[in-house]
Image (cartoon, rainbow, N blue to C red):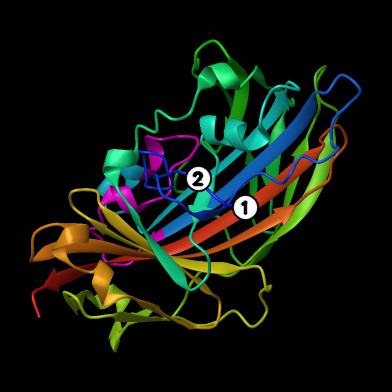
Amino acid sequence: MRPNGALSSACLILAGAALVGCSAPVAGDAADASGAMTQGVVLVERAINLSRDVDSTSFPVEADEAALPSAAAEGAGSVTNVSAKFMRLSSATDPELAERVVGSPLDLPAAGSCMVLSPAADDESAISLSSLGSIELLDAGDVTMKTESTEMPLAARAFPDVGDLVFGVFYTSRDATSDLPAPARYVFESSGSGLLDRFAFEADAPAGPEEVRIGDVDLADGVALDAGVGAVVQWRADEDGRAQDVIYVDVTSARGAAVRCSFKDTGRGVIPGSLLDPSTLGPLPANVTVAVHRTRQAPFSASGIDLGEVRFDLSVIGRARIAAH
């Protein structure tokens, strides 16, 4: 967890605000004699559309920014994405800033609190590329993700140029409708290359959110909310989950403004009424999407990788209408 961050334009996973967020582990002494180090970031995302007409802006998009919104627009029931990046960072590069530039971080408020994600903050010109140093995205050979029911080779793609400071390849799933079971154990393997040793590691995905209700109404049925009145969100707590699992809820208006609240996985949380009003989400009545996520972050160790993290983000998405009370 890190203290501050901003969210990206593609899916409101990044937006400016003073936050507590999820990002790269602290580098510490994890560097070789030259001062360079290798950081691995693996993301597994699955979004289930409960209402069949969910706005695509609520779907997580990281590596393949076109895949998830396109599938959502078609009313897909489940939209998925797997991505992996293995970054070689120079001694001058801040690992946290590097992860932001390559599009991997998730920023969250502290558990029990909320923040406003404003589309006006998407530019985030505060990031100075000149302060980064170089970032090389390493070829790891053939990369494959496996579960008990799924084997998914990931596709290697060239990373878009970012000021001539970021270069190389990253890996992503080929199909946004691939089966990503949860809960499940995931195995990630690479054949290795001249730049990175062969490796294999495992990580356990939590269950996706289930039995989600807003007040007394199932999220799948569509929800009516009163402006300025707190909304009680309920879900089935994951008794087999881990203490570090987090539930977060995004309420996103058609104009792109959003509220994000983060909760411990206890089965209940409240979105403050002060955030469900025109000053935050725009003129009323407002049609919004409500996305309830369960996320888990876990470190991994692999040969040649100094810092490694897997993040699972599993969500269900429905619609709501906010009107004056």
The C terminus: image quadrant: bottom left
Percent position of residue 271, x then y: 34, 74
Please give left or right for residue 252 compared with residue 249 in the image: left
Please give left or right for residue 296 compared with residue 218 in the image: right
| Residue at 12% over, 63% down | 286
- Which residue is labeled 1 in the image? 311
Instruction: Determine if the magenta segment contains residue 51.
Output: yes
Indicate the quadrant where residue 238 lies: bottom right
Q: Which amino acid does label 1 sit on?
A: Arg
Label 2 Cα crowd, 10 Å radius (few <14 / some 14-19 / many 20+): many
| Residue at 8% over, 75% down | 324
Magenta stretch bounds? 48-68
In the depicted view, which residue is nearer to us: 223 or 221?
223
Q: Which amino acid does label 2 sit on?
A: Gly
Percent position of residue 313, x then y: 53, 57
Indicate the quadrant where residue 183 lies: bottom right
Nearer to us: label 2 or label 1: 2
The secondary structure type at the circle numbered 1 is strand
The first of marks 2 and 1 along the sequence is 2
Residue 23 is marked as none
- Which residue is labeled 2 in the image? 5
